[in-house]
Amino acid sequence: ITHVTFTSLSSALISGSSSPKVYHVSPDYLSWNDALTYCRTHHKDLALIESAGENTAAANVSDGDKWIGLFRSTGKWSDNRAVAYTAWYHELSGKKTYHEPCVHLYGSIWRTSSCGIRKAVCYSGEDLVFVAYK
């Protein structure tokens, strides 16, 4: 079970079986590259969405279209992780519209577009990873 707690109008906390992610919206409209820099400077990274609950939390952090950390040409998240969960527009509508390089949330669905100016969804918090060396 995933729980979403809205901590303010500009951030949302999502928790489940791992450490919580907190989603934040940028105060300004930015290009995708500037959004990446902003999120990495002020939080952890552009939103990395791994479940329907996280998608809802990222979508509800503010109104309007928002950048997320997926870059279509690589097919990976901005931190180079593989994509496991998706919410593409064409999956819901049957229309193939993923020909542009950058990915944004349009409501709670993912769409591609040129990498122009939008607000960004950043996240902080991270799953805990333990590494043992022998």
Image (tube, rainbow, N blue to C red):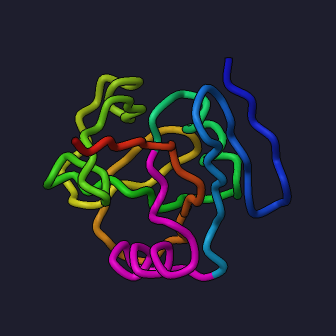
Residue at screen point 45% across, 62% down: 46
Residue extending farthest to the front is 134
Residue at screen point 28% across, 67% down: 114
Of residues 95 and 134, the one nearer the viewer is 134
Q: Position of residue 110 (x, y in %)?
A: 42, 43
Q: Is residue 6 left or right of residue 124?
A: right
Residue 38, magenta (yes or no) = yes
- In this rendering, is residue 101 above or below 58? below
Q: Is residue 39 left or right of residue 100?
A: right
Q: Is residue 3 left or right of residue 30?
A: right
Q: Quadrant of the N terminus?
A: top right
Of residues 61 and 127, the one nearer the viewer is 127
Q: Position of residue 15 (x, y in %)?
A: 68, 35
Residue 73, magenta (yes or no) = no
Q: Position of residue 37 (x, y in %)?
A: 41, 80
- In this rendering, is residue 66 above or below 132? below
Q: Position of residue 87 (x, y in %)?
A: 42, 32
